Image (tube, rainbow, N blue to C red):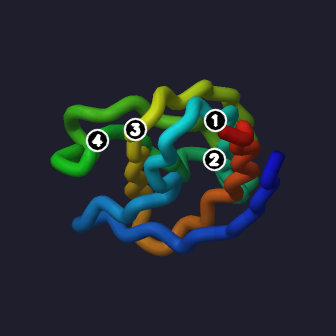
Amino acid sequence: MPISTSAITLSNTTATEIVGGDNMPHDVTIHNMTKSSNEYVHIGPADMTLANSIHIDPGQTIHLTLRPGDVLYGMSDPNGLEVGILDIQKND
């Protein structure tokens, strides 16, 4: 079961791929690395915007299970926030 971690700096104008697709389901933990109030990480599909996505509060951690082929993107408000990713992939 491969486990990978990363810290990705996000833009407030362009969606950035934060979790790539796999041929098996995988469990993902996403953490908004900032502790400052009113600084949000947004997640969604490739065509996401800050207006049509859900946000993760400062310091908040969420857990998702992605299906095979699912890809997750992120943006930040304000520009330049960092998101931490823990991706646990299941073996085929």
C-beta proximity under 8 Å, tags 2 and 4:
no
Q: Which residue is mark 3?
A: 70
Residue 81, given in percent of the width and then of the height, sits at 55, 66
Q: Is residue 5 left or right of residue 22?
A: right
- Label disc, if present, on residue 26 of the rendered structure: 1
Q: What amino acid does circle 2 point to?
A: Ser
Q: Residue at x 46, y 68 (%)?
A: 10
Q: Is residue 74 left or right of residue 39?
A: left
Q: What amino acid does circle 1 point to?
A: His
Q: What amino acid does circle 3 point to?
A: Asp
From what the image shows, is residue 1 above or below residue 7?
Answer: above
Between residues 5 and 8, which one lies in front from this camera angle? Answer: 5
C-beta proximity under 8 Å, tags 1 and 4:
no
- Label disc, if present, on residue 34 of the rendered structure: none
Say whether disc 2 or disc 4 marks the residue closer to the N-terminus. Answer: 2
Q: Residue at x 43, y 57 (%)?
A: 76
- Label disc, if present, on residue 45 of the rendered structure: 4
Q: What amino acid does circle 4 point to?
A: Pro
SS class, disc 4: loop
From what the image shows, is residue 85 above or below residue 55?
Answer: below
Circle 4 Cα neighbour tier, 10 Å, few/some/many (<14 / 14–19 / ≥20): some
Gap between marks 3 and 1 measured at Cα: 9 Å
